[in-house]
Amino acid sequence: MRSPCLAVLLIATSLAAVSRAEPPPPKDWEVEITPYGWVPDLDASVETRNGTEHFHVGMDDVLENLDVAAMGRVTARWRRWVGVLDGVWTVLEEDDSFQRGPLQVDADARQTLALVQALGGYRVISRPGGLFGTAAPGDERLFGFDVLAGVNYTYVSSSFELERDPVGPLAGNDRHFGNSTDWFAPAVGIRLHNDFTARLRLETLASVGGFGVGDAPDHTWMITTLLSYRFTDHWLAAIGHRGITANGDDGDLRMHGPMIGIGYRF
């Protein structure tokens, strides 16, 4: 009589062990918030009546003339539905003065740039264990391939102020020049991310937009690559690179440079 009871006990114990070894179900949702800094090189060419004018602003010039900036991104996933919201707002200001004969002239140039990208889509590939690994019990690594669509918003404002100091009987004089423009344009993209370990993740988001809608350029490209390391269960550090290209009838713009940020994932 003991043998059947012992066999039943062994089977029950084995089933319990197998049940404990099964990996937990994946989280239905994940949110990551990452404020970051991005310092780009800027190259531009503008078509004028006198031909094409070329401009270059290096990273050191950007840092020297940076007045204020705010940048950040939020990524979210619910099951296989994903979303990305990324925003950049910068104000560059440069003060200069020059002498023209007896007159002292002060010049103040101010450039404001805002970029916002909002994308949503679906994770068409979700491979447990990462691209190069095999899923194990309790393994949170994942390789994902997302297809995205949404909208880009761009705002550009430039102002230039000249102030002439009074000299003798000549009174001082101020002149102000400036203009601004903004536009919305559709965008489509793909995103790949791979967990090399439970804490180390590489993500690349590539999108194209513009399509000449309204005041938008004919084509805009943006590629962002980030390598993040989660040093606690929630906090992470990220480094990467971003490149943006815009091509239109009035000229071309290229910005590229390093990124660094601190994020919170839950």
Image: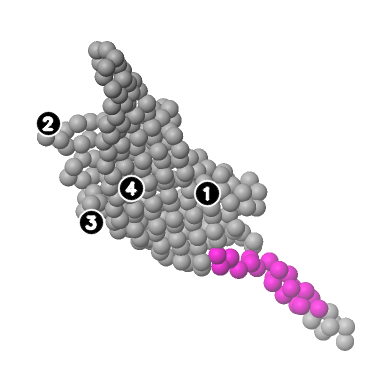
Q: Which sits in the foreground, 35 or 24? A: 35
Q: Which badge, 4 or 1, comes first in the chain's sequence? A: 1
Mark 3 vs 1, N-terminal side: 1
> 91 or 232, which is in the foreground?
91
Instruction: In the rendered view, tell whether residue 183 sits above or below residue 36.
Output: below
Describe the element under mark 2 as helix, strand or loop: loop
Q: Earlier in the sequence, mark 2 or mark 1?
A: 1
Check whether the beta carbons of the residues at disc 2 and disc 3 lie within 8 A of each other. Answer: no
Residue 237's quadrant in the figure?
top right
Give the extent of the magenta segment: 9-29
The one nearer the camera, 14 or 54, is 54
Residue 17 in magenta stretch:
yes
What is the chief secondary structure element of the magenta stretch? helix
Q: Distance of mark 4 from mark 1, alpha carbons? A: 22 Å
What whole-number distance in Å separates the C-alpha atoms at marks 2 and 3? 27 Å
Compute the Cα span from label 3 to label 1. 30 Å
Type of residue at label 2?
Answer: Asn
| Residue found at the far bottom of this picture | 1
Q: Which residue is mark 1?
A: 34
Total tally of numbered discs in the picture: 4
Per the rendering, the mark at residue 198 is: none
Which residue in the rendered view is the most extreme toward the right? 2
| Residue 127 in view, yes or no | no
Q: Disc 3 versus disc 4: distance between alpha carbons?
A: 15 Å
Q: Is residue 142 visible?
A: yes
Q: Which mark is residue 155?
A: 4
User: What is the x, y in percent for residue 167?
Assistant: 30, 16
**Residue corresponding to mark 2:** 50
